[in-house]
Image: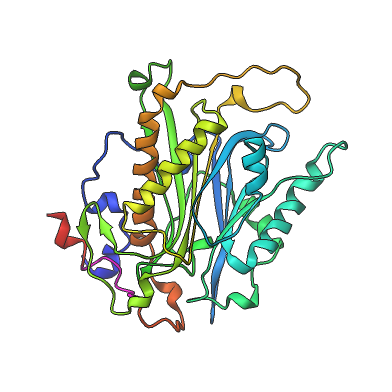
Amino acid sequence: MANSQKQFKRIRDWMEIPGGYLPGPRNSITDVPGVTCAHVTLAEVGVRTGLTLISPCESDVFLNPLPAAVETGNGFGKLTGALQVEELGEIESLIGLTNTLSVAAVLQGLVDYHAPKLPDEYNSVNIVVGETNDSRLNDIRGCHVKPAHVAEAVALLSKDVVEGDIGAGAGTVSFGFKGGIGTASRVIPRNITGEAEDFTLGALVQSNYGGNLTIYGHAIPKPEEPAARENGSCMIVIITDAPLSSRQLKRLAKRGLIGMTNTGSVMSNGSGDFAVASSNFTQNRRKRSARGQHYYYLSDDQLNSFFEAAADAVQEALYNSMTMASGASRGNSIFPGLNPAQYSEILPLIVN
């Protein structure tokens, strides 16, 4: 098989993946019922950027907010709406990802989407948008992402998640290799939790960070350009259909960051590393007009399997974000250290 074909494999197609839980049918964040995703990619001479949109549930998330939490690894970045998510323990908007200087445009696009749907008595919505800095491959100062691109993404929301250098990952770099968007999932069976049903946990990542890359314990040779490996950022989104409280989701988000460090990151000084975790368990969606609503949460003693699943799904998603990136978005790159060969020559060395 030619190298150009090999580099489009997901990491699971290269090797056996360790861990105690199996993925869902798509091995994607959209294995969680109600979750959909879409990308808008801008790729032309000098422009390699875009946005990625995640809808965390089927119905209007503002009318019935979801329990949610945010965890910060290293705070050198922007995550709009994070303080209110932390204060109220809930999320009430679609989740956007883009580049650093396009956060305002995506925020405005999401306001344009949500505001017309607000009931008359509400005049505000807390929008969540995260970012990484793709200026090594993109004309970031040109602010090419516009609010109208959000409407395009909304129209494209689906269960099928494309990975690699697409959407918010079009211009990202990880460990000196091409980064991008990656996703993975894990199913936590009922016989583990003692509940009446299986639960699914899914992760989606935007990889743009550095360190000393390892793939399940195997050290990967470093690219020629050392600066390629240092700073950057990583956005992690975790969603589950399990009944978890915002406090428990914050603990879950921390384990998502473990998945990141397992790939070889130390969350460097210039890295903005954030994990957003949410539960769309139907009974626990707050009804804004209701009084005295009752909720059902798992006990803390039942969380270990979800902690393991979060770390494992994030780690696999991060590898997928790189192995599925074609490198085509290098374009007229001013970043000579970027290795367009990806893993086509590296991975066979550790598979056997």
The C terminus is located in which quarter?
Answer: bottom left
Q: Nearer the viewer, residue 50 or 208?
A: 208
Name the quarter where the N terminus is drawn.
bottom left
Counting from the top left corner in percent of width and height, residue 115 is at 79, 47
Q: Quadrant of residue 185?
A: top left
Which residue: 66% across, 57% down?
150
Report the residue at 37% width, 43% height from top: 311
Give the total of numbered labels. 0
* Residue at 43% across, 76% down: 330
Magenta residues, start to end: 339-345
- Which color scheme did the rendering employ for the protein? rainbow
Viewer-closest of 246 and 239: 246
Residue 106 is situated, as x and y percent measured from the top left of the image, at 67, 59
Residue 82 appears left or right of 186 = right
In the rendered image, residue 214, in percent from the top left (x then y), is placed at 26, 58
Relative to residue 68, is residue 119 drawn left or right? right
Within the image, what quadrant is residue 89 found in?
top right
Query: In this view of the protein, can residue 36 be seen by the observer?
Result: yes
- Quadrant in the picture for residue 318: bottom left
Give percent across and percent down for residue 131.
56, 60
Vertical placement of residue 328 versus 203, above or below: below
Query: Does residue 236 belong to the magenta stretch?
Result: no
The furthest residue to the front? 269
Q: Is residue 258 left or right of residue 252?
A: left
